[in-house]
Amino acid sequence: MAITTQIGSESFPSKAAATARCQEILYTYPGETGTGSGQPQDVTDPTHIAFLTALVQRHPEAEEKIGTGIAGFKVQVNPDGTGNTRCFWVIHPDGNATHFSFKSCL
């Protein structure tokens, strides 16, 4: 039996459905051309920002990932990974950023 997953205001009938939502958001932001290593792109949709804020709060190391606070999020192709591996980053008020795995949040 699937376990319902609640992330912010969104409810998912299964972990697979929550995973699909995370991947949908990741691939909404393909990266800005000409921005250098990893092609980072800011997350701009308010519903995505609300979802990611709730998502990162579920991370087992949430306090560390959130750090000094959340000023925004970006999606970046992992410059150290292989292929087109994307990940979410929390942008802190001081301009620093911390990556987090959505799979750890589910």
Image (cartoon, rainbow, N blue to C red):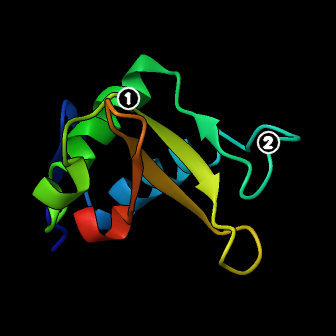
Asked whether residue 41 is in view, the answer is yes
Q: CA distance from mark 1 to mark 2?
A: 22 Å
The quadrant of the image that shows the C terminus is: bottom left
Q: Residue furthest top?
A: 46
Q: Amino acid at mark 2?
A: Thr
The quadrant of the image that shows the N terminus is: bottom left
Asked whether residue 12 is in view, the answer is no
Residue 71, given in percent of the width and then of the height, sits at 33, 28
Query: Which residue is at a point 77% across and 75% down the rendered structure image?
Result: 83
Query: Which residue is at a point 39% across and 23% down the rendered structure image?
Result: 47
Identify the residue under disc 2: 35
Q: Residue furthest bottom?
A: 82
Instruction: Check residue 49 in the rendering and tell me which mark sits there, or answer none.
Output: 1
Residue 67, given in percent of the width and then of the height, sits at 19, 48
Query: How many numbered badges does the structure rendering display?
Result: 2
- The image quadrant that residue 63 belongs to is bottom left
Of residue 78 and residue 6, the one placed in the foreground of this image is 78
**Discs 1, 2 touching: Cβ within 8 Å:** no
- The image quadrant that residue 90 belongs to is top left
Of residue 104 and residue 98, the one placed in the foreground of this image is 98
Q: Residues within 10 Å of mark 1 (few under 14, many from 20)?
A: some
Q: For the residue labelled by badge 2, is the local secondary structure a helix, a strand or a loop?
A: loop
Q: Residue furthest front?
A: 94
Residue 62, given in percent of the width and then of the height, sits at 15, 57
Q: For the residue labelled by badge 1, is the local secondary structure a helix, a strand or a loop?
A: helix
Q: Amino acid at mark 1?
A: Ile
Query: Which residue is at a point 34% across and 55% down the rendered structure image?
Result: 18
Query: Which residue is at a point 63% across and 66% down the rendered structure image?
Result: 78
